[in-house]
Amino acid sequence: MQRYGTVSDFESQVYCKDGSIIWISEDARTVKDANGTLLYYEGSVKDVSERRQAEEELRRARRDTEQLLLNILPQRIAERLKRGQVIADHFAEVTILFADIVNFTPYSAQVPPVQLVRLLNQIFSTFDQLVEQYRLEKVKTVGDAYIAVGGLPQRRDNHAEAIADLALAMQQAIAHFTATQATPFAFASASTLDLS
């Protein structure tokens, strides 16, 4: 105020006598006499609480949206999408693993839903750890099926071998669950896909 003689859109939080908190926006200017002596300040104050609340809700929604993106997309892809970049990439060759837990459907009819979900979560969490160990990418789960890919989003020459190693490790994991949970599970399939 001393330097420019005016303040515009200055926002501050105000604590009211009734205990509530509001946000205000102030416009003020100095009024001086002909000699430049300060006489008084004049200006306006308006309540901007609703706008500030809407902005906070928008920030919260943006954070939630970003978290949702990260839950369904790899971080590199989510970042590119947020920057408005095209996210269609060409990969000449990748290997996709489709894993289905054999005998899971009949087993699911015999156990309570909570126990079934707990077991499926344990199995898929184990598979997730294996995917990370072999530096592959989980695509998704559908029911009792698990889909992973090698060779994208990071290209690598040994994607087929890495998927094969993952498939073998998954078979060992299912054998462990069969032995410890008395479940009659088996495991099926992987395939290579040439996209050139």
Image (cartoon, rainbow, N blue to C red):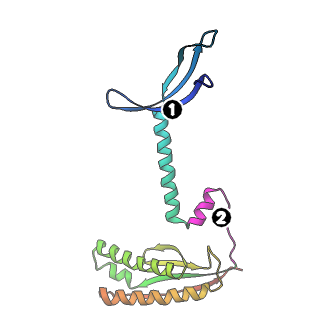
Callout 2–callout 1 Cβ contact below 8 Å: no
The quarter in which the C terminus is drawn is bottom right
Foreground mark, 2 or 1, reads 1
Alpha carbon separation for disc pair 2 and 1: 40 Å
Residue visible at 48% across and 31% down in the picture: 48
Instruction: Specify the label residue 178 is tagged with.
Output: none
Q: Quadrant of residue 88?
A: bottom right
Residue 161 position, x and y percent, is 58, 89
Image height check: is 81 above or below 183? above
Asked whether, in this view, residue 156 is left or right of residue 125, the answer is right
Image height check: is 71 above or below 175? above
Residue closer to the observer: 161 or 47: 47
Residue 90 position, x and y percent, is 69, 73
Q: Answer whether residue 184 is visible to the viewer in this image.
A: no
135 in the magenta segment:
no
Q: Tell me which numbered mark, 2 or 1, is placed earlier along the sequence.
A: 1
Count of marks placed on residues: 2
Residue 192 position, x and y percent, is 61, 85
Other-residue count near label 2 (Cα within 10 Å), few / some / many at <14 / 14–19 / ≥20? few
Determine which residue is flagged by label 1: 11
Residue visible at 55% across and 79% down in the picture: 136
Q: Amino acid at mark 2?
A: Ile
Q: Answer whether residue 54 is visible to the viewer in this image.
A: yes
Residue numbers of the magenta segment: 75-91
Q: Secondary structure at mark 2?
A: loop
Residue closer to the observer: 39 or 35: 35
Q: Amino acid at mark 1?
A: Glu
Q: Quadrant of residue 37?
A: top right
Determine which residue is flagged by label 2: 87
Residue 64 position, x and y percent, is 48, 54
Q: Secondary structure at mark 1?
A: strand
